[in-house]
Amino acid sequence: MKVRSVPTAALVTIGVLTVASCGSSSDPGGESSGDYAKDGSFTTIVNTDPGNLHPLITNLTATQAINSYTNDSLLAIDPKTRAAGSYLAEKWSENGTSLNFTLKKGITCEDGTTFTAQTAANNINWVVDKTNGSPWLGASVPETAVATADGDELTIKTAEPAPFLLERIGALKLACQAALDDPASVRSSSNGTGLFKVTEVVANDHVTLERRDGYNWGPNGETTSDTLGVPQTVTIKIVTDAATTANLVLTGTVNAAPVAGADIERVEASGLESMTSNTLSGQFIFNHNAALPTKDEAVRSALVQAIDLDDYTDINTGGKGSRATALAVVDPRACDYDSVTGVVPKFDMTAAKKTLADAGWKPGSDGVLTKDGQPLQLTVIFANYRDTTSAAAEYAMKQWQELGAKVELRGGDNNFIISNTFAAKDLTSWSISIGLTVQSDTPSIFVPYFSGPVPPAGVNFASIDNPEYTELAAKASVLPGQESCSVWKEAEQALFTSSDVVPVSTSPNFMFFNGATSLYAPIGGTLAGPGIRVLK
């Protein structure tokens, strides 16, 4: 089967994507419509509770997975070429600071109302309104964007050029008007234009969806409510344990599941078909809060120097990964460059100790380094749901203890990691995250997460203040497309030079299928709802 283009968001995947798969490389079966079942059921997995289901309020990976069934985007973006295909829009054009879309006729929302170009414009303007607190502001939608509608025509203008504007806005999952008017109404339900609607939400257990009638505006015109193989019911289970996930797809209890790490080999051995690609599997994020020792650049640099990142990669990925070369590694990458090599400090424990000594850190009576009365005490958040990630955390602790730090490891599943880093109520409660990955296909996505206001005013959860990154990101943000890539590279290197954030490893992650297939390659572990086909 030819894997078609997938409707995908310009992903900001906040969450631990190391156990989510994306991309495609092999045929998942179902060679013809004769292999498809009528009105079947489909079950898949996400690895954390999706929380608020409003597509414009959250950007957690698990939430995007649910939204891929319930909400549509203006365009379908090819996972290999980034070429745009039709979805809610049948025609589109880009001209510098202006985007124009012609919407298909007859699009309806779950509540029966019509989704119009004006509804689409209201979505864009809703994101731009800072009082709504959308994480997509600045990430997918520029702050200067203004959207208007005239009949079926949607126009979006920005004050200045913006990189990859068509893909970023074209891939944004849109809400229906009632969800914009009352965001709380879809917190645990749905009201979108998608092929499916939410019928049940059980926190930390599952989400159930049912197919809608009358849907005929699927991506590239390939899917309607009556298309053979489209499931009648979809169940999305929340499973945090990697081994359990592998077992469920092996037994056919679920029809598709992301598998990573050591479990890949035993699932592959079963002969199940899969789709694969690279995702970011290791990332160091240092908390710059003024109350913590990691606010000191010398501390951050020494902590990176004290780790052999090649060894860490081998341990963390079970020997199946490789070193990351940029922040944005999700396919299809908007910019193809290596911003890491020659910038991230090399492993040298002697040099790391000297870095700290030169900065005034001295051993205390207990051997722990101190400066101005503050001990080098670190709280490290890590993923403990796989042996490999736990082993990598133990390795990092050993190295940092040798450096002279007192290290507390705090491990947990995806919910734990997110709630103790990205969504931490106490911004001083963690020093380093080696469990959270902030990743995307587009470098511009990272700006609000690694600069700007801290929570609750913003999403700069690590309190990073790197003036050079901020300046370069602002410069890149007004350059069109590929012209911006060289500047984004410099911006990322400013983060790495200061050891603010370090992308460490990428891994091949797999989406395995048992009794089902997908027309579209999953992106960031997210399967596009209209592409699901249940097999006989």
Image (cartoon, helix red, strand yellow):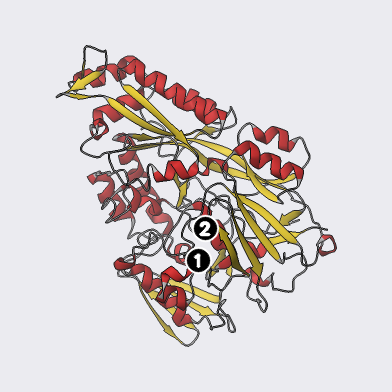
Q: Position of residue 314 (x, y in %)?
A: 54, 26
Q: Which amino acid type is shown beneath numbered disc 2? A: Gln
Q: Quadrant of the C terminus?
A: bottom right
Q: Earlier in the sequence, mark 1 or mark 2?
A: 2
Residue 324, x across and y down, in percent: 48, 36
In the rendered structure, the answer to whether residue 173 lies left or right of residue 520 reads left
Q: Is residue 526 above or below residue 395?
A: below
Residue sitting nearer the eye, 31 or 189: 189
What residue is disc 1 on? 173
Q: How many numbered marks, from 0 up?
A: 2
Rendered residue at 72%/33% (across/down):
266
- Tell which residue pokes out farthest to the left in this image: 372
Look at 35% across and 45% down and name the residue there: 424
Q: Tags 1 and 2 in contact by the CB under 8 Å rule?
A: yes
Given the image, on which type of amino acid does mark 1 rest? Lys
- Cα distance, mark 1 to mark 2? 9 Å
Of residues 8 and 200, the one nearer the viewer is 200
Among all residues in the image, which is located at the extreme front? 202
The local secondary structure at tag 1 comes to loop
Extreme-right residue of the structure: 34
Can residue 337 be seen by looking at this rendering? no
Disc 2 designates what residue?
Answer: 64
Q: Quadrant of the N terminus?
A: bottom right
Find residue 362 and report its image quarter: top left
Q: Is residue 196 above or below residue 489?
A: below
Q: Nearer the viewer, mark 1 or mark 2?
A: 2
Q: Label 1: how many residues lie within 10 Å, few (<14), some (14-19) or many (20+)?
A: many
Apparent side of residue 383 relative to residue 289 in the rendered image (left or right): right
Q: Is residue 512 visible?
A: yes
Check residue 294 in the rendering and tell me which mark sits there, or answer none: none
